[in-house]
Amino acid sequence: MTSALHVVARLRALDREGLEALLVARRVPTRGLASLLDVAEWLVDPAHIREAVAPHGWRWMHRMRANDPRLLDEAARLLLAFREERSTGSSDAAPTDAEPVLLPETVIALDALLGDDGSALTSLVGAVSGSATDAAEHAFSACSLAIDALWMLDSAPRPVRATRNGARMSGVEIRRIAAALDQSVDTVTAVYAWLARGGLMAPHGEDWAPTESGRAFASRSIGERWRVLAETWLDGVSPATRAMLVHGSATEPSAARATAVQASTPGHEPEPMTGAIPVVGGSVLSALAEASTLGALVDGRLTQVGALLLDDLVDEAVALLAPTFPAEIDGVYVQPDLSIVAPGPLRADLDARLRESADLEQRGIASTYRVSPQSISRALAAGRTIDEVTDFLRGISLTGLPQPVAYLLGESGARHGLVRVAPIDVESGRGAYVRSADEQLMRTMLVDQALSPLGLTVDEGRLRTRAPWEAAFWSLLDAKYPVAAEDRRGELVSLRRQPTATVRLKPVPEGTTKLVHALLDEVERTPAQDDATTWLQRQLELARRAKSFVRVVIALPDGGTQELDLRPTSVSAYRLRGRDAHADVERTVPIASIARVLPSPVS
């Protein structure tokens, strides 16, 4: 077993941030541990090492067991591996750090969790499925759906639900989005799980929002988008899930689902959670939906792409899929009925720009959008001018700009700003004035049930609400009024309903902070050499309580050593008393003379 004394030396070398990060990452309890040695013993306990390894996916464990250099560095930070000092060869040279070496307890945990992970699935490819085209349709749909799912976060507030396991999106919200996108709940659940795990979306205040990475994701090619989703999915696949996908799907289409049902029944170990997934679930059953959405499974059978992914051959999987994806286009058909048809997958940057002034109605290899007064108002509110919107649509249209569309653009441009919203108190953001030169429109807003949450009242020829300025603006826009935002000087300002979230590290718990302060105080108070004495005394005291023998290695004045098998009867700061297993007499040994304490063969 790894000595806790070795861990103490590494704990002493950490600064406050490093120690906090370690305790949080390893989920070290803050009660019952009062010293560096207590923490060290907890960290090297085989059960706690397994607990640190188990939440990771098969890919992490497989690479760790294969001594991936990047993961070994991570293992060293988690004290699942040690860097051993080595000499450069010269007697006067300073020692340098060697590559980290996994602790024996870490290797045991990996072997127990991985078992025979059978990383030779590519030999099954020919037998499992015919070609990559079986997976291409699923993969393409997943890439498109990921863009749509991120866009849904911008289209309306999606509340964050705080749970003990992290931030999540409620099942009700998932079902609402699934209905809007005409997708199954399982498929939408899988995609949002990847977006959260991959850091493409995160909480922003009380709602979910895309991150910077999420916004950049929309501009990537189809193949690059699929790689991001595949990497995120693979990182979350546990050894149990991988085995289920491989062995269950390789027999018959229903076998994988049957295996999943069995794995989710009482008495079977549940799949470990690998992160804060924003949906209710995380069982092995959900793995089937995720694998199918990505194209790793088709009709319950493992595809060539799935076999490559489950062999951790992502580059090869991307190369296999890339030729099967349809080519992206940069032109659309703008039609007189105000619809816009993209005859193929629209280039990602053009799709994002088109959505500023048109609503997606149907997604597929050929997608349909529609312009409306409300969609044009949304673009104008975000700062686009009517000329910019017109020029953009004309530039991507393969059919010119039909008269009905041109009329809508002109009418929307003329009506934009007929209703104005301005803040009452800029500092607090609370309260807003609503005004319009159209008195009939003012009377309509006052009695409009869609605006009742604003509680509009008449105030000196204007309408007034206690709602926040931006909330009042979006409520009016959603109710299809030609609204524009202005500051208190009456100048138009742009508003975007598209906040960008930041992936934030979890705050360090107060109990962990207090424990870290106590440990650092101990480091300052006590010299490092005292750790060895304390460790010896603790080992001897544990043997005394257990009434068991230990082998005590005593350093002699002449430089030699003597070994005694003793059963400790009394342990103090200065001496050890114990019964000699062979001479059957009680001996007294100075603590300062004890070099090591080893397990004894005497029982």
Image (cartoon, rainbow, N blue to C red):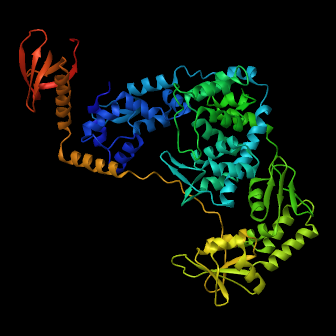
Residue 68 shows up from this direction: yes
65 horizontally vs 144: left or right? left
Residue placed at 77% from the left, 37% from the top?
136
Q: Is residue 59 left or right of residue 435?
A: left
306 up-or-down from 346: above or below: above
Left or right of 185, for residue 373: right
Q: Residue at x 35, y 36 (%)?
A: 96
Residue 222: horizontal and vertical position, in percent? 74, 45
Q: Give x and y (percent) for residue 330.
A: 83, 55
In the image: residue 14, left or right of residue 603: right
Residue 92 position by quadrant? top left
Residue at the image position 47 percent from the left and 22 percent from the top: 112
Number of numbered labels in the structure image: 0
Tell me if I can see residue 121 in this picture.
no
The image shows residue 521, relative to residue 65, as above or below, that is: below
| Rendered location of residue 550, percent (x, y) | 19, 18
Looking at the figure, which quarter contains the N terminus? top left
Q: Residue 245 appears in which quarter of the rendering?
A: top right
Residue 575 percent across, percent down from the top left? 8, 27
The front one of 198 and 90 is 198
Instruction: Assign the C terminus to one quadrant of the image.
Output: top left
**Above or below 326: residue 443:** below
Residue sitting at the far top: 582
Q: Is 458 in front, or is 239?
A: 458
